[in-house]
Amino acid sequence: MPVTLTTLSENTAGRPDFMAEWGQSILVQTDGCTVLFDVGGSNVALANADRLGIDLSKIDAIVLSHGHHDHTGGLCDVLKRLGKKRVIGHPDIWDIKYAKRPFEDKEAFIGIPFAREELEHLGALFELTADPVSLSGRVMTTGEVRMTTDFEIIEPNLLVKKGGEFRQDPLADDLALIVRMDQGLLVVLGCAHRGTINTIRHAQKLTGEERVYAVVGGTHLAPASEERIEKTIQELKDIGVQKVGISHCNGFYASARVARAFGDKFFLNNAGTQTTFP
């Protein structure tokens, strides 16, 4: 069963007629199931879909990997175009999310930039659960990812505001998409705030499938330590991943490290990239 991924929003563009932005949106197409995984930070995903002649009205569901604005900011424009659509995510996507960046004097709001009522008025049919959601016989969300590795941590500068106070965000809403293929699992990551390897292990446990054919999306290695980058690469090799297409929050340094480690198994998954597996 072939699976086609089309990256509609990403930090860089793979062709001169495509738009880029800080964000991510990936269209996942398999037999009988089409999912828009994240919607980017603005109307870029829609604009790039139009450039490719892709009719997004055919999607079965929108899945939100987590509640940060660079993965949800395009939702208003998408819903204005598509009308009523299932929107699947974790309940914590509606937490009031902030980041404390070293170059800013105060905390910056980075949560969903719309009111839930506005999105529901535009047609969002929210299905919010911490549990995995099956979208077809082969496609499912991970639901809430357990943190089991000893080297993957959540950045302490990512915060939620509760009761007027800032606390570290556990990012329990961070989830991924799993596609069962004959060759093993395809794991599509949003930002992998809870860890790329944690997410893969969770997918293996959910499905009972140890083989992981491909991992695509954000690995959040840009702010990672040298040790975490090295351990992530080694774990990906030990798992036996055959294709690694990273994007968005990996950073150029970590991307180069992964590219060097995986050679022709690696590809840069930027806006405009269309990949069919296997």
Image: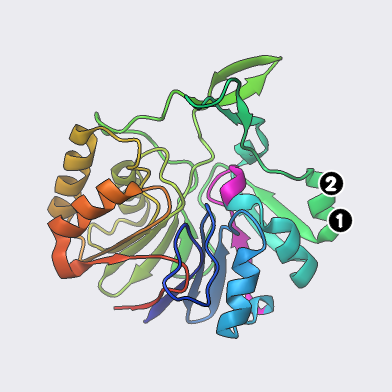
- Amino acid of disc 1: His
**Callouts 2 and 1 close, C-beta under 8 Å:** yes
Q: Is residue 68 magenta?
A: yes
Q: Residue at x 50, y 51 (%)?
A: 132
Coloration mode:
rainbow
Judging from the image, what secondary structure is the residue with disc 1 in? helix
List the residue tagged with mark 1: 121
Q: Which label was assigned to residue 255?
A: none
Q: Is residue 82 above or below residue 200?
A: below
Query: Quadrant of the image for the N terminus?
Result: bottom left
Answer left or right for 171 relative to 81: left
Q: Residue at x 35, y 29 (%)?
A: 153
Name the spot of residue 173 as percent of width and height, x first.
54, 40
- For the record, the magenta segment spans 58-70
Name the spot of residue 16 as percent of width and height, x first.
47, 76
Residue 83, visible in the rendered structure: no
Judging from the image, what secondary structure is the residue with disc 2 in? helix
Name the spot of residue 201 as percent of width and height, x first.
29, 46
List the residue tagged with mark 2: 117
Q: Is residue 228 above or below residue 48?
A: above
- Amino acid of disc 2: Glu
Cα separation between marks 2 and 1 = 6 Å
Counting other residues with Cα less than 10 Å from the Cα at mark 2, is it few (<14), some (14-19), or many (20 or more)? few
Name the spot of residue 182 as percent of width and height, x first.
29, 75
Q: Residue at x 57, y 49 (%)?
A: 70
Q: Is residue 75 magenta?
A: no
Q: Nearer the viewer, residue 41 or 196?
A: 41
Residue 198, visible in the rendered structure: yes
Answer left or right for 20 relative to 251: right
Location of residue 52 by image quarter: bottom right
Q: Nearer the viewer, residue 213 or 248?
A: 248
